[in-house]
Amino acid sequence: MIEIIAATIGDVKRIEESGADRIELVSALSEGGLTPSYALIKRAVQSVKIPVNVMIRPHGKSFTYTDEEIELMVEDIIIAKELNVNGVVFGVLNRKNEICEPSLEKLLKACHGIDVTFHRAIDELLDPVKGIEVLANYGQIKNVLTSGGKGDILKNIPVIKNMVEKSKHINVIVGGGLNAENIKDVNEKTKAPAYHFGTAVRNDKSVFGEINIDSLKILVNTISSQR
């Protein structure tokens, strides 16, 4: 499965044209991706046939949220569901950089019937493998996006492999530092079921660059040929 980040309607259409499998829709790429607007979600879902998963993240300061911010996230999930998204993407930590299970449970209550991805907040943990074992206790969580922790993704391959082995029902989506130069190596060594790309498929590798449809098609074909 190949998932690509979109921040505009143009992105959404290019991603579908490329042959990628799924879209992660965000705003504010420069902040790592925040919750997109109502109008953008609505138009994105209407514009393509492939699944659209929506980022639920009220700010870029951290992955720790107040009770009021969790309430806002719940409302955003409800709105996203009403707009017929395939799923939502979020991550919640406590002040000790551990998965905040009370907040997670509040969010999951709003997620009935849609796909749930726990994002790269897991890479902030001291032990991402332990983190995925915690998340595996929640049947609603279908995906975890990770680069195996902080630092270079190639150096994190042993951690990613361990996460794949411990993931149970969860699909491990590898992303964060993936590009055309390292994807073959990462794919062969981790055997992960899914991959996620952001700036690697944009002009100048910039959050402000347009998606390069030719580069993206090559990437999709490269991964597809290894399946």
Image (tube, rainbow, N blue to C red):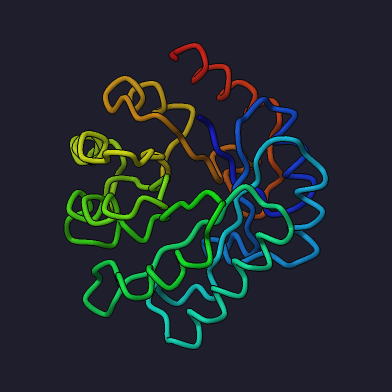
Q: Quadrant of the C terminus?
A: top left
The quadrant in which residue 94 appears is bottom left
Q: Is residue 1 above or below residue 32?
A: above
The quadrant in which residue 168 appears is top left
User: Where's residue 117, x and y in %?
Assistant: 46, 51
Say left or right for 87 vs 173: right
User: Where's residue 213, x and y in %?
Assistant: 71, 31
Along the line of sight, which residue is nearer the eye, 200 or 164? 164
Say left or right for 102 vs 40: left
Say left or right for 155 vs 116: left
The quadrant in which residue 49 appears is top right
Residue at image location 20% in from the left, 41% down from the top? 159
Residue at image location 62% in from the left, 71% down from the top? 76
Along the line of sight, which residue is nearer the eye, 32 or 43? 43
Residue at image location 43% in from the left, 27% down from the top? 181
User: Where's residue 191, x and y in %?
Assistant: 31, 24
Q: Is residue 67 above or below residue 132?
A: below
Q: Is residue 122 above or below residue 58?
A: above
